[in-house]
Image (tube, grey):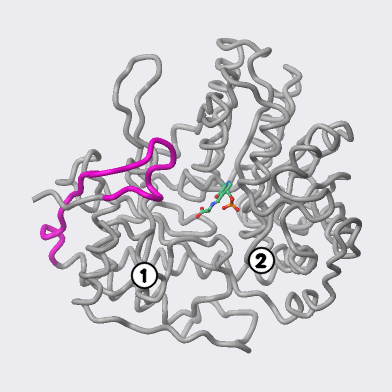
């Protein structure tokens, strides 16, 4: 027998989960207006909504929390946090924030004005939302291969460099205050970005004098993919790969709720000391003082330890195999899985799974709801409910390039039998897929509508 992977940890604390009845789930989904975001967590059996803040902290992280120093200014916890970021990422300056979107808000607030453009391989929803509320224009420039869910290629998360130069020349460098790159590329199926692409993106930004910031949420998973997929890096330790990745950037925003394996926290890190002054006042008004930024001292300590654990090679080896295994299980269940499997999640091409449901009726939401009813599994749509918009130039309705359903895997939380159970539920759903109905929006806010949208089934 070959063992697909083994968890490099054992369980010390457990949290019981309870399976509801089908009738209870039908009722819960109806009450949630067919949007799983509004289903109470207690009514979910296996929660794959997100890998953000849902990881299990280690004994070392809990122990570090007890050392938390809650001084308002200059807490010991802050200096341990700062040291970990300097050591792992290599940026000299860092400001803590309550989570990733806080970091985005602080950075953009200091650098971006209404009417300006910010390029990215693909903005995640909160990054896009943070720019839109300023009145700026986020532009996604993914490589074309990211939109082909069948194509096996190592770095489908890359930035399209030709399109990046075209954009800079078209809108003018004076209208681009900052350039981003998201690693791994969450909105593009969690695909990694290659070291070459990071370096080349940086070179283009540098050529035009545009400050380059990395959206670093899943930097460690990205570094692991570089190690296993780029032969040049196969013998390079992950922490060295990480240092090289960030050496090309002027700074980063980070949601520590992902690869730093904490339940809350984030930061913006950078090289330019002046930026501290520019962001500082805003940080104090909106997040907290410079050395805690909306977090408790104990959170900073857990984060510092988590940065080391999240870049541990044994852990990353397990993490990638665990995610890949769920991809295999879901493929065997008859779902069209986006290939290759990403780092933090398995993405299913729901447009392909349910081709009779058009993008305007959100096939990935329909599949999410069917999985919830069948087995209490909560997944999340990364498709047109999230990304549909009106093109500002043509006035046309633009749908998401792919209607993806993300099975997001919390870190160190679910075992292989949980993954096998998810496969069984998916198999049952795919036995009678024609029963699955599309949806229409009955109410939604203007920005970030997927979080709050109310829907009904289309008969
Ligand atoms: N950038 C990326 C690429 C993200 O995936 C997220 C969060 C953020 C920024 C914002 O970070 O949640 O700490 O404010 N993604 C979560 C997800 C919510 O489910 O993918 P945050």
Q: Is residue 442 magenta?
A: yes
Q: Image point 20% across, 65% down: which residue?
A: 430
The percent position of residue 140, horizontal first and vertical second, equals: 50, 30
- Residue 34 position, x and y percent, is 26, 57
Q: In the figure, 67 relative to 253: above or below? A: below
> Vertically, is 251 above or below 266?
above
**Nearer-the-camera pick, 26 or 139:** 26
86 sits left or right of 376 in the view? right
Which residue is identified by label 1? Answer: 329
Is 8 in front, or is 400? 400
At horizontal 80% and vertical 75% (from top left) the residue drawn is: 64
Q: Residues within 10 Å of mark 1 (few under 14, many from 20)?
A: many
Callout 2: SS: loop
Q: Secondary structure at mark 1?
A: helix
Residue 444, picture quadrant: top left
- Examine the rendered structure and indicate whether residue 77 appears above or below residue 375: above
Residue shown at 67%/57% (left/top)? 256
Residue to which mark 2 is pinned: 262
Sequence-wise, the earlier of marks 2 and 1 is 2
Which residues, given as a range, are shown in magenta?
Answer: 432-454
Residue 210 got which mark? none
- The crowding category of the residue bearing disc 2, from other C-alpha atoms within 10 Å (few below 14, some 14 to 19, many at least 20), is many
Disc 2 and disc 1 in contact, CB within 8 angstroms: no
Does residue 451 belong to the magenta stretch? yes
């Amino acid at each position: 027998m070959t063992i697909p992977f083994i968890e490099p940890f054992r369980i010390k604390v457990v949290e019981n989960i309870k399976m509801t009845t089908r009738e209870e789930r039908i009722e819960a989904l109806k009450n949630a207006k067919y949007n799983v975001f509004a289903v109470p967590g207690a009514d979910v059996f296996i929660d794959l909504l997100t890998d953000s803040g849902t990881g299990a902290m280690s004994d070392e992280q809990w122990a570090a929390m007890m050392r938390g120093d809650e001084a308002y200014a200059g807490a010991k916890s802050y200096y341990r946090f700062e040291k970990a970021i300097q050591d792992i990422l290599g940026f000299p300056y860092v400001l803590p924030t309550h989570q990733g979107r806080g970091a985005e808000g602080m950075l953009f607030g200091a650098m971006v004005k209404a009417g300006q453009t910010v390029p990215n391989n693909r903005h995640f929803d909160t990054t896009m939302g943070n720019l839109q509320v300023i009145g700026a224009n986020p532009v996604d420039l993914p490589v074309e291969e990211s939109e082909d869910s069948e194509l096996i290629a190592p770095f489908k998360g890359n930035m399209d460099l030709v399109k990046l130069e075209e954009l800079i020349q078209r809108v003018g460098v004076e209208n681009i205050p900052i350039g981003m790159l998201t690693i791994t590329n969450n909105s593009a199926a969690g695909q990694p970005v290659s070291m070459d692409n990071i370096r080349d993106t940086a070179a283009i930004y540098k050529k035009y004098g545009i400050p380059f910031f990395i959206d670093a949420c899943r930097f460690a998973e990205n570094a692991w993919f570089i190690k296993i997929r780029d032969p040049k890096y196969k013998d390079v330790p992950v922490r060295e790969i990480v240092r090289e990745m960030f050496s090309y950037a002027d700074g980063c925003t980070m949601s520590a709720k992902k690869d730093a394996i904490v339940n809350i926290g984030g930061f913006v890190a950078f090289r330019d000391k002046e930026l501290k002054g520019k962001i500082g006042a805003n940080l104090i008004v909106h997040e907290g003082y410079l050395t805690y930024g909306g977090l408790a001292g104990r959170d900073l300590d857990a984060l510092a330890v988590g940065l080391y654990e999240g870049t541990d090679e044994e852990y990353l080896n397990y993490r990638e195999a665990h995610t890949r295994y769920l991809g295999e299980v879901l493929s065997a269940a008859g779902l069209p899985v986006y290939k290759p499997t990403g780092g933090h999640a398995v993405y299913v091409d729901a447009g392909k799974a349910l081709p009779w449901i058009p993008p305007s009726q959100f096939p990935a939401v329909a599949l999410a709801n069917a999985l919830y009813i069948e087995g209490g599994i909560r997944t999340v749509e990364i498709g047109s409910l999230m990304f549909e918009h009106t093109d500002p130039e043509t006035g046309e309705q633009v749908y998401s390039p792919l209607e993806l359903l993300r099975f997001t895997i919390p870190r160190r939380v679910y075992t292989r039998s949980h993954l096998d159970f998810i496969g069984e539920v998916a198999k049952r759903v795919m036995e009678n897929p024609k029963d699955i109905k599309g949806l229409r929006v009955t109410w939604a806010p203007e920005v970030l509508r997927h979080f709050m949208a109310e829907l009904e089934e289309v008969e």
